[in-house]
Amino acid sequence: MQAVDDVYTIPQEHLDFCQTIGQIAREKIAPRSAEIDERAEYPWDVRKLLAEQDILGLPFPTEYGGTGSGTLMLNMAVEEIAKVDASCALILMVQELGTLPIQLYGSEELKERILPKCASGEWSPAFALSEPEAGSDPAGMRTTAVQDGDEWVINGTKNWITNLGIADFYICFAVSDRESRRLTAFVVEADRPGFSVGKLEHKLGIRASPTGQPIFEDVRVPQENVIGEVGKGLSVALGTLERTRLGAAAQAVGIAQGATDYAVAYARERRQFGKAINEFQAIQFKLADMETTTAAGRELLYKACAMADQRHPERAKYSSMAKVFCSDTAMAVTVEAIQVLGGYGYVKEYPVERMMRDAKITQIYEGTNEIQRLVIARTLK
């Protein structure tokens, strides 16, 4: 096993920007969080706000209108937003997920055509890999792409796709060689004939982010919409997820810290038996463990982000470890936060029940934690 001796540093300008993002989140997003969760409506006003503040430019290089500040800064921003609202943090996360295939593998023409509009916040993307019968196993994919002259004809249905009905384009993966089961990645604009929005899911958490089934019926796209090489779509997907799973880890850290902060403040004010409940050791130990595991997750996350920025050879293992640890931590911490609040934690008047509902998905999407443990284990042989 290669030694990992890289040390990450956080430039002051990143810390300053994070402080600004945190303030925006607390002042502008937090007051809306309960409402947008209850209504399960996409918060267009929040997306507009994130675009105006250049936050949606974080995933992009400067040559395409982005900030060029790297993976660590991006995920510090995701964490800040997720402290108050995980659904709104997903707006920023999907900006990376739905454009990273183009950044890493797309032609220069494709980059110039699409990335600046995403960096400005004018366009929003989606990443369409999973299907009803192909979640953790892309080899079970049924969506097909058949070449017809200078065009490709795509047919199939995807599932569990974030930004459904919101996205201006979809990164669609399809079987382009049926005999070898090879995949190819395509950009499919939402206004192409044959594309339609199918069923939207009614979810436990992350309710303000629409998720569901995009449908492709004889959708024609030109050859220039192919991302990378024909038949190499699985590499595009895996190379993307290797980095974007850090977004799920950052979202999880934000949820855990938000829940911890709320529980700490509540325990300071809530009185039982004549004193604040934070004077009882049973509560003190819960809060101490919540703060400790969240801090440990953050360190692992930041380390993994720095390794991604440095293209470290062990970056895939560390991104999987960060995703597993941080998401498991978010789930455990939010459950404990509810316990600290007691009956109040169980009702919607207080935000910790929403945080618990939001935390659960971080163990599932961007590659389930079971899959991440397989990835980690394979590096140890």
Image: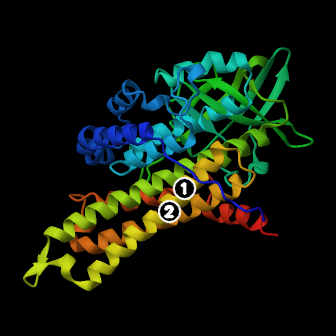
Residue type at the position of mark 2: Gly
* Nearer to the camera, 335 or 111: 111
Residue 70, horizontal then vertical, whole percent = 56, 37
Residue 346, horizontal then vertical, whole percent = 27, 67
Residue ID for mark 1? 301
- Colour approach in the figure: rainbow
Residue 245 is at least partly visible in this image: no
Please report contact status of discs 2 and 1: CB closer than 8 Å, yes or no.
yes
Residue ID for mark 2? 297
**Crowd band around label 2 with a 10 angstrom C-alpha radius: few (<14), some (14–19), many (20+):** many
* Nearer to the camera, 283 or 39: 283
- The span from disc 2 to disc 1 (Cα, nearest Å) is 6 Å
Residue 325, horizontal then vertical, whole percent = 55, 65
**Crowd band around label 1 with a 10 angstrom C-alpha radius: few (<14), some (14–19), many (20+):** many
Compared to 183, does 369 lie above or below? below
Count the labels in the image: 2
- The residue tagged with tag 1: helix, strand or loop? helix
Residue type at the position of mark 1: Leu
* Nearer to the camera, 42 or 281: 281
- The residue tagged with tag 2: helix, strand or loop? helix
